[in-house]
Image (spheres, grey):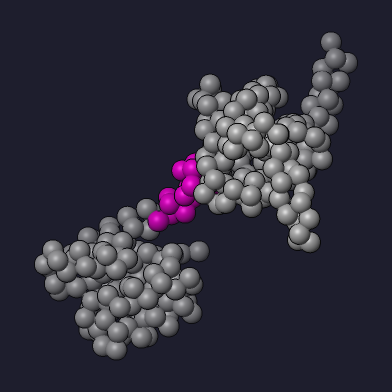
Amino acid sequence: MSERILVADDDPDILRFVELNLRLEGYEVVTAGDGAEAMQHAIDDKPDLVILDVMMPKLDGYEVCQRLRGDPRTSGVCIIMLTAKAMSADKVFGLTQGADDYLSKPFDPMELVARVRTTLRRSGEMRAASPLTGLPGNIQIENEVKRRLALGEPFALLWLDLDNFKAYNDHYGFMRGDMAINYTSRVLEDAVRADPSNFLGHIGGDDFVAICGADSGEDLAAEILKRFDEGVKGLYDPLDAERGAISVKDRLGNEVAYPLLSMSIGTAFSDAITDHRRLIEVATEMKTFAKTQEGSFVGIDRRRRDEEQDEAAGSA
């Protein structure tokens, strides 16, 4: 599906010129002749990028830009300001209102297309990465799993999840919760960097994915848990760390004791699994099993591995 671009300009000649050049590049284009129409199209059509002329009737480009950024439905859209003004102060003001880039008239069609591509690419990279840890996000994780399956080289997929994180977050607040997520990220990065071919991604919240060679999966999981448990007490106030638990009120107002954060890992292997969704499902199943166990634990899908080992032993 092609990316959708909303172009707003009160000059019909410029509107047609921009629309034509973007359509020739394969983009889907929606047009608006004033600021109010641009706002409505942005909400209804959900464009990937908005090109705004500064000087427009009803609402000028600065006002539209500000409103787009302030509306949860449109706050993440890319914005390029288009204007005849070339003063630095005008550009700075546009950027302070939330614009991603600025293009002055008259402009070359090639420059317009280049700026559109760059802005969309930059936005895609930001969406693909976790804003908290900077690790690859869902899109890159899925692409990496697909890539490795296509190569046909066996690998292990580790799905990692924190235990008791909600209680920790409720007790200490979201800022300390973010610190716990970043601590987890550092532990994982330190463990996976031993092999440059390993991959680490952040699904979101307290969920992560690590990918390594099939023969290294169990050892990597064990190393991660060892590193995590060694330093987890540092996330707690001294009395809570010494007690080994925190007290959090449930919905009925009763005090409930929660153990220190631990980690559950679900491990699946790509042996004979050709669908990336199924591989992720198996890792998730193993993670769910691991969470039923006390403390940090690794759930390993041994079904395919054991079958292969039995076959190898039988042929020896």
Q: Where is residue 168 in the image (x, y as percent from the top left)?
A: 64, 46
Q: Where is residue 132 in the image (x, y as percent from the top left)?
A: 48, 47
* Residue 268 placement: quadrant: top right
Quadrant in the picture for the C terminus: top right
Q: Say whether residue 80 is visible.
A: no
Q: Quadrant of residue 290?
A: top right
201 lies above or below 46: above
Closer to the camera in the image, 176 or 210: 176
Q: Give the magenta-colored segment's residue range.
A: 123-139
- Residue 291 placed where, x, y %? 77, 40
Q: Which residue lies furthest to the right in this view?
A: 314
Q: Is residue 131 magenta?
A: yes
Question: Left or right: where does residue 253 sit relative to residue 40?
Answer: right
In the rendered image, the residue lying farthest to the front is: 239
Is residue 82 shown to the viewer in this render?
A: yes
- Residue 255 rendering spot, x and y as whole percentages: 76, 51
190 is within the stretch colored magenta? no
Residue furthest out toward the left: 87
